Amino acid sequence: MSQAPSIAFSHFGIYVTDIARMEAFYTRFLGFTVTDRGELDTTGGRVNLVFLSRDPTEHHQIVLATGRPADLGFNTINQMSFRVDSLGTLRSLYKGMVEGDMRLEVSEVLPACHGNALSVYVRDPEGNRLELFVDTPWYVNQPLRVPFDFSLDDGQLWAWAEAHARSRPGFKPREEWVRDMSVRMGLA
């Protein structure tokens, strides 16, 4: 194949043990809307499904499916990542996780700077790791994860993030990195 097929990410599905609790978490905390629900007979038995989206052009971006064993010894999901629109939104979500109603639903809340993003990692009610992040205008070599302090105001936090990014190998403006990747991917 000379050219990569035209594909775009659409959605993912996860098995859950308590579908009502997981539906409540994703709708109340992250603002997803239930677009459909129902049962489906599968080779593994009957499965209840809840379809969730935040985009009216996508029927679903997340599918919750019953069938996850309660005693599963290993969580096979590494992480699910959600881009937010601003540092203010990220700060508000963080505050809800550590001070608000969601503090009882989540665990392992960790703010982390990657140079190219400011992120908050958190475990949902069933232990799946989520990353909520806002892009920065910079690129640095990855992987990189450095804790940051939300007690800084937005100006201080952006100044700290930029100074830290500039001190890292591979620093460049994000636009330059995007141009470089477009060339590497044969899109430029």
Image (cartoon, rainbow, N blue to C red):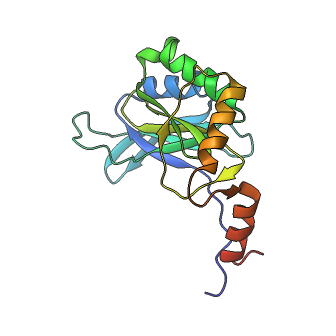
Q: Quadrant of the C terminus?
A: bottom right
Q: How many marks?
A: 0
Q: Nearer the viewer, residue 52 or 171?
A: 171
Q: Is residue 121 above or below residue 135?
A: above
x and y, in percent, of residue 90 in the image: 63, 29
The reply to whether residue 134 is visible in this rendering is no
Q: Residue at x 48, y 54 (%)?
A: 143
Q: Position of residue 139 (x, y in %)?
A: 64, 55
Q: Nearer the viewer, residue 177 or 46?
A: 177
Vertical arrangement, residue 180 with respect to residue 9, above or below: below
Q: Is residue 100 visible?
A: yes
* Camera-side residue of 95 and 57: 95
x, y percentage for residue 24? 51, 22
The answer to whether residue 122 is above or below residue 181 is: above
Asked which quadrant contains residue 4, the reply is: bottom right
Residue at 69 percent across and 58 percent down: it is 172
Q: Name which residue lies at 31% across and 43% down.
A: 75
Q: Residue at x 62, y 22 (%)?
A: 152
**Is the N terminus in the top left, top right, bottom left or bottom right quadrant?**
bottom right
Q: Of 133 and 151, which appears nearest the observer? A: 151
Please state if 27 lies on the left or on the right of 145 as rendered: right
Where's residue 135, x and y in %? Answer: 67, 44
Q: Quadrant of residue 187?
A: bottom right
Q: Is residue 26 above or below residue 164?
A: above
Residue at the limit of the structure toward the bottom, as seen here: 2
